[in-house]
Image (cartoon, helix red, strand yellow):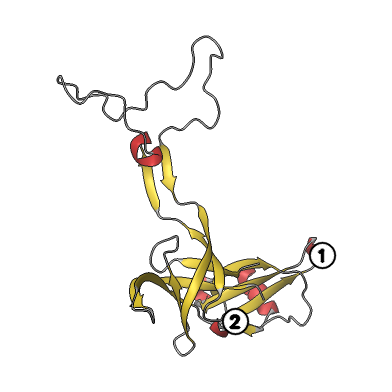
Amino acid sequence: MLGLIGKNIGMTSIFLKNGINVPCTVIKVNPCYIIQIKTIKNDGYFSIQLGVDDKKIQKTNKPLLGHFKKSKLSPKKKLLEFKVSSITNLELGTKFSVDLFQEGELINIKGISKGKGFQGVVKRHNFSGVGEKSHGQHNRLRAPGSIGAGSNPSRVFKGKKMAGRMGNISVTIKNLKILKIDTYQNLIILKGSVPGTKNSYLMINKKK
């Protein structure tokens, strides 16, 4: 297995053995179960689908109920797919827990960043603004300025930094160090921060 599904509990700080206080993130990693195994013959590649946290049957539609029935498991709230190089010795319903990782190990975390809504160029792209801050000027302080040339090329180039939706995208942070693992409470304490809000799900991958 290359990874598990976790939930962002929040941030705190702990003291290392050398007395240095470091910021860290606490991640809850409940037992994950194999819901589906994909093969080259059927799907064109090897991967497994993991599910975590039980979900009420009343809140699950019939197609998903049939999907979970194949693995003889109760419905799960979150499903994520992990690519693997081989599916040898993997079976539907197999459980994986937090002891898959070790203290001191480097891992990669993937999640959905916080959504900021529609933002202007100053906040979204760190523009300085074009307007003067004196002589009674109040209308153009945070404007983007010119966005293109004149009659040639008579258009705005694709990818131009402009106002728009900010955040709410998939973000991966690599090489985060595991400071501590609590197998009793299924917790992983990582050095640094991770993308997403509290109680959001995260994909935890071993460093390849």
For label 2, the residue is 100
In screen coordinates, is 18 left or right of 42?
Answer: left
Locate residue 51: give its quadrant: bottom right
Helix, strand or loop status at disc 1: helix
| Residue 113 location (% of width, % of height) | 45, 56
Residue type at mark 2 is: Leu
Q: Nearer the viewer, residue 10 or 106?
A: 106
Instruction: Point out the image quarter for the C terminus.
Output: bottom right
Disc count in the image? Answer: 2
The local secondary structure at tag 2 comes to helix
In percent of width and height, residue 17 lies at: 39, 82
Q: Whole-Å distance between the Cαs marked 1 and 2?
A: 26 Å
Q: Residue furthest top?
A: 151
Placement of the N terminus among the 4 image quadrants: bottom right
State the mark number for residue 40. 1
**Residue furthest to the right:** 41
